[in-house]
Amino acid sequence: MAPRILVVDDDSHIREVICFALEKAGMATVIARDGVQALESFRRQPADLVILDIGMPEMDGLEVCRQLRRSSDAPILFLSARDEEIDRVLGLEIGGDDYVTKPFSPRELVARVSVILKRTRPGRVTAAAPAEPLSQGALQLDPEAHLASFAGKALALTGIEFAILKAFAARPRQVFSREQILESAYAGAVHVADRTIDSHIRNIRAKLAAVGCDSAIDTVHGVGFRLGRCEART
């Protein structure tokens, strides 16, 4: 079944360009002209992924995302007119999965959407051996079920966040450079800025800190990141 993508932008030309590119890639699209229409559409029929413009009048994309996150963890790819908005887009209180800066290449946008969907949608059943559960301290990851918990408390991770944490947990002693994190978490040749990776790391740390873990990910200055002890706060 073709993935259903909700495209939200107040510019009709941009909506047409995005929908044409996505449909050419075999995806189904639904459009919304503003934030209110987007929320109504999603409530009627949730999408597999939302492409969401930030700079819309009345209700901007950030507020739409906040409201969506109250009831859904569907992946969100933001459209931003300014690269400087990345920290807001992927901020801890927002929960975006990725962003594309305008003007953008439709091919790149489709590639980013495909990467996110591969991480968040169930794949075809194969004869491959099931992935073994991973653990570090009080952190537990079940790659098959795509579930994460800390000290018995469920973690609401985005697809990219889960992929990063899974890569760390699979090699808990390894220090990962940003390039290695990119290779582990993003499938395909997609360019992602260092700031995007750093934002995801901050999000993971904050979500684990919220359930009592202050040792989730260590920074190795000048090199990269590795999984911390993941011990419960005393």
Image (cartoon, rainbow, N blue to C red):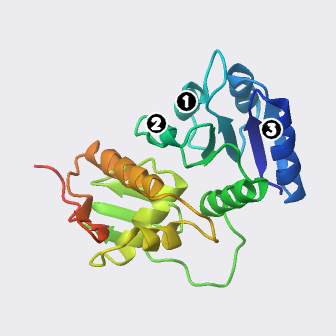
Seen from this angle, which residue lies furthest left?
234
Q: Earlier in the sequence, mark 3 or mark 1?
A: 3
Instruction: Work out whether 209 lies above or below 134.
Output: above
Q: Decide which of 33, 179 is in the foreground and name it.
A: 179
Q: Which secondary structure lies at badge 3?
A: helix
Q: Position of residue 90 (x, y in %)?
A: 48, 43
The alpha-carbon separation of the residues under discs 2 and 3 comes to 22 Å
Q: Which mark is residue 14?
A: 3
- Residue 88 is tagged as 2
- The residue that disc 1 covers is 62
Q: Position of residue 149 (x, y in %)?
A: 37, 55
Using the rendered view, name the quadrant where residue 217 is placed: bottom left
**Left or right: 156 in relation to 98:** left
Tell me whether circle 2 and circle 1 mark residues in contact (CB < 8 Å): yes
Residue type, mark 3 in image:
Ile
The residue positioned 18% from the left and 54% from the top of the image is 232
